[in-house]
Amino acid sequence: MLVAREFVDIYRNPVVDYSLPDPSVVKAEDGYYYLFATEDIRNMPICRSSNLVDWKFVGTAFTDDTRPAFEPGGGLWAPDINKIGDKYVLYYSMSRWGGEWTCGVGVATSDSPAGPFQDKGMMFRSNEIGIQNCIDPFYIEDNGKKFLFWGSFRGIYGAELSDDGLSLKQGTEFKKVAGSAYEGTYIYKRDGYYYLFASTGTCCEGVKSTYQTVVGRSKSLWGPYVDKQGRRMLENHHELLIGRNDRFVGTGHNSELVTDDVGQDWILYHGVNVKNPGGRVLLLDRVDWKDGWPEVDKKSASAESEKPVFFSDALSAVLSVKVPGNKAVHYPLHMEEAADGYFNYEWKADTSLPVLMFQKIDKHDDEAYLTLRLMALEDVYFNFNYRLLTGILHANSQFYMPGFWYRRNQRSPKSAPSFQTSDSWVVREDRLSAPLTGVFDSKTGASLVVSRTGELSVDALTTHKEGEVILSGETSLGFIGFENLDGQSALAFGYPYKEAPKSYLRKLTLAPEIEAYRFLEKGKTLSLTWKVKSGKALDFSDFICQTWEDSYDTYRPMPVDTLCSVEEVKNVLSRYFVTSLVDKYPLVYNSGAHIRVDDCRPNGIAEVGFIGRTLLNAFNAWEYGWQMNRHELINNSARIFGSYLKNGFTSAGFFREYVDLEEGTEKKELSIRRQSEGVYAMLHYLSFEKQHGRRHAEWEDKIRHLLDAFLHLQKEDGSFPRKFYEDFSVVDASGGSTPSATLPLVMGYKYFKDKRYLAAAKRTADYLEHEIIAKSDYFSSTLDANCEDKEASLYAATATYYLALVTSGNERLHYAKLCRTAAYFALSWYYLWDVPFAKGQMLGDIGLKTRGWGNVSVENNHIDVFVFEFADVLRWLSEQYSDSRFAEMADVIFTSMRQLLPFEGHLCGVARPGYYPEVVQHTSWDYGHNGKGFYNDIFAPGWTVASLWELYTPGRAEKFLKQ
C-alpha cells in the first residue's frame, strides 16, 4: 500500500549556527564525514555528519596540553584534513593577527578522524622560507606525488612534500600560482582541468565582511589558472562562485568538494548571518557544472534546498516473504557495514531472515550503481522493495516513466493512471519504453533518475492478475515508480514486479494492486543492479532530453536482423491494397478500420484519415503501381480517387471523413486531423501527377477550398479545434491535434504558391511553441483518447521539421530547435530495450524484439508501428545537430518494425498476408482480448500499412518541399 503523508525535511542554511570558520572535511572509513575548523572553539573543533547537513560536535583535535606552540600566543587557523596511507593527517596554520612573518604551517597525525592528534611540529614558517603570511595550507596528490599549497594575500604558493607528507621535500622549489588577492586555497581536478578555489576580500568584519569565493582553472596543477576570458589569477582575475546576498555575507574559505551518492557535488564554507552576525557559521550549497565551470545557484548562499543524497540516509528497503497459502510478511531492513570487502553493506532486519542480502554501491561522477545480491538460506518466495528519498518536495515534482508517465499525467482521466487517482505509482518495468523512473524539481531544476540495468530476458506466467501472486518460474521484470513520503518524493523500485496503488489492465480500467513473488532455492544467489543518476536541467523538456540521451547510451539498442528487405516488405504490404478494396458502394475504398484479426474481411467503414487512411493508401498504391508497372493497383487507386471526387465531400466542401456504408451511418462531427490527413494524401497525389505531366483541376479546386476553410477555422492563437461541424461550430476546442494541420498548410503553400497557407502554418508553430512544446504538454492528438500521447509529440516534431525545410536563416534554426525538443518527447515513447515474454506468449515465441516499437498513450498501453515520417525527421536532426543517436535510433525503428510482417508461413497471428498488426500487447495489458504476447481481436491495418509505407519511402517531405 502506498501512503502519502504531509511534510518534508529539507535543509536550511546555516547547517551549523555557531562559528566554524575555514572548514575542511574528510570522509572516514566509518562512513561519516569529519569537519575541522579554525579554533573559534579552542583547540580546533571536530564535527561529524553522515549527510553534510546534520553535524554533531565530537571533540577537538588537541587539548591545552597537546596543542602546537611554535607561534607564541598564536591561534590554530584554517586546517586541512586528509587521509594519507593509514593515518589521518591534519595540516594547520598557526598565527596571530599581524604576525605575517612569524606565522607558519604545522602538521599532526592520528589513527582516528576524531583524534586525538599528535602534533608533529612546524613544517615551515614565513621568515624561514621568505614568503610572507604562510597560512591556509591545502594538500593534494597528483601523478603519484604529494604537494602542499598555501598563502594569504601575499600570493598563493605550492611545493612538493616528502613521501610521508609530513615535511617539505628536500630541495623543493616554491612556485607561485596565484596573485595577492587570494587566500583559502583549494584545488580540485575534474575532466582534465585543475580548478583553483580561493577567497577574496575581508573575512572577519562581521556584516561588513566582503569575503567571497572565486575560482579559476588550468590544464596543469601549476597553472596558469585563468578566468573564462583567459586572464590569469596571477594578475588577480577569477570567476565569482559565491558572493553576498541579503541573508549571508562574508561567504568564503570553502572546504573540499564532496560528491554525494548520486554524483552531485556540494561545497561547505563559512559566512556571516546578517540577522545573527555572531561568528562565521557553516553553510552548504550544491555545485553544478556548466560548460566546464562550477556554479552555485544565484552565485550566493541558498536559504534552503534539498538535502544531498546519501544512501545510508536516503535508501531504505523492505523484504517481503510469502509462504504459499499465507499472507506475506513485510520486514523493514536497515544497512550495516559489510564484513565482505566487495560489498559496502548488508541489509538486516530485527529478526532472522531466510535470505542474506548484500549491497554494493559504486559511484562514478554523477551516477551510482546499486548492486543487490540475495542468497537463500532456505527455500523462499520473496519480493524486495527499495525506496530512495530524493530530497525534492513532492509538490514541486514532475515525474517521468517513459512511454507511460509525463509530469503528473494531468491530461489523463481518473480511470487511467494519473494524479487524479493517486500521487504515488509503481508499475511493471515492461510498461515502459526504458525501465526507469525519474523526478524533476520544477523549482530548482534538480533531477534524479533510477534505471534498471543488466540482462532482462525472461518472464513467467501467473494465474492471477491481482493481489499477492506466485510466479510460475523466473522473471527478469521488476517494478519502478515514485511515491509521496512525508511530502518528499521518493523513487521506488525493486524485484520482482508489483503495481500499486492500482494495476492497469485495459483501456480506462484500473484494477487492484498486484505483488509478485519469485521462488529462490536454498543455496542459490541472485544479483540485481540499478543505476542512479543526478542532474540539473533547464526545464522538464531539457530533463527528458538528458534522460533519453543517457538511457539510449545505457541500453544502446541495435538494429534488428529481419527476414525481409524493404522491397519484400512493400511487395507483401501491397497485397493489402488489393484484398482490402471495397467497390460495391458509391465510395470506393480500402477497408482499413475495425477489421477482425482472425479473418481480415473488409467491412463498410470508409475512413479518410486517422486509422483508416483510405486516401493515403490509395496514393501509396498509385505511386507503387506506376513504379512496378502493376496496373491493378493503378486502376484501383484511380477508382478510389474518382469516387471521392464525386461522392467524398460534404456540402460545405469537407471530406466525408468517416462513413459506415454497411450501416448507412456517417459521422457529422469532423476532425482537423482526418481532414488534414486527407489533404496531405491528395497533395502528394497531385504533386506526383504534376511531375508526370498530368493535372487534375477539379481535385485542385477541392483541396484549395479545404485549405481556405482551414484558414477560416484556425483560431487567433494559431491552434485548430480538435473537432467541429461543417458550419465551423466547435465541438472540441482543445488544440492537441493542431500540428496535423501544419503539414498540409506547408504543402499547400509549396504546391499552390499561396503565402497565406505558409503564414497559417507558422501560426500553428507559434501555438505549438508556447502551449505545447514550452509546456511539455503533448496531448490528445489521437482521436480515441484524452491523455498524453506519442502522436502529439511526433506530429509536433514533424510539423516544425516541415517549417524548417521551407525557411532559412535564424527562422530555420528556430524551427529546427523546436523540432529537436519535440523529437526527444516522441523518442521517449519508443522502446530502447527488448521486453521479455513467457513461453506460450505468441509474440515471444516468434521472437519479437520490442526495441524500436512505440508505446501508444497513457490510456492505451500497448506498442505499435506509428512512425510515418518520423525516421526522416530523426535522420535530418542527426545531420543538423551532428548527433548520431538520432540516425541510429531511426535505423533501429527502420529494421525493428519489419518483424511482424505477415506472409505465408509467417502470418504472426494475422489471417491475411499484408495486413500488418496494430494492437501489439507487450505487457500486462488486454485491450479487449488475449493479453500479453497477443493482439486485440480487432485492428486497423489501414494506418499500419500507411505508416510502414511512409517509413520505407524515405525522403517524401524533402522531395515535395524542395522541388
Image (spheres, grey):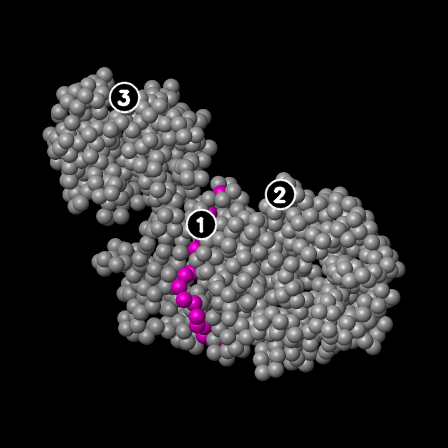
Going from the N terminus, do you reach mark 1 or mark 3 first? 3
Residue extending farthest top: 98
The segment highlighted magenta reads 445-463
Q: Is residue 622 depicted above or below 481 in this figure?
A: below
Going from the N terminus, do you reach mark 2 or mark 1 first? 1
Where on the picture, by quarter, is residue 356? bottom left
Pointers 2 and 3 in contact (C-beta within 8 Å): no
Three-letter amino acid code at the position of disc 1: Leu
Q: Residues within 10 Å of mark 3 (few under 14, many from 20)?
A: some
Secondary structure state at the residue bearing disc 3: loop
Q: Which residue is mark 2?
A: 814
* Numbered badge on residue 696: none
Nearer the viewer's eye, disc 2 or disc 3?
2
Pointers 1 and 3 in contact (C-beta within 8 Å): no
Question: Looking at the image, which residue is at 25% across and 59% down?
Answer: 342
Going from the N terminus, do you reach mark 2 or mark 3 first? 3
Cα–Cα gap, marks 1 and 3: 43 Å
Q: Which residue is mark 1?
A: 448
Any magenta on residue 866?
Answer: no
Inspect this view and state whether residue 509 appears.
Answer: no
* Numbered badge on residue 154: 3
Three-letter amino acid code at the position of disc 2: His
Cα–Cα gap, marks 2 and 1: 29 Å
Q: Whole-percent x and y of residue 235?
A: 35, 23
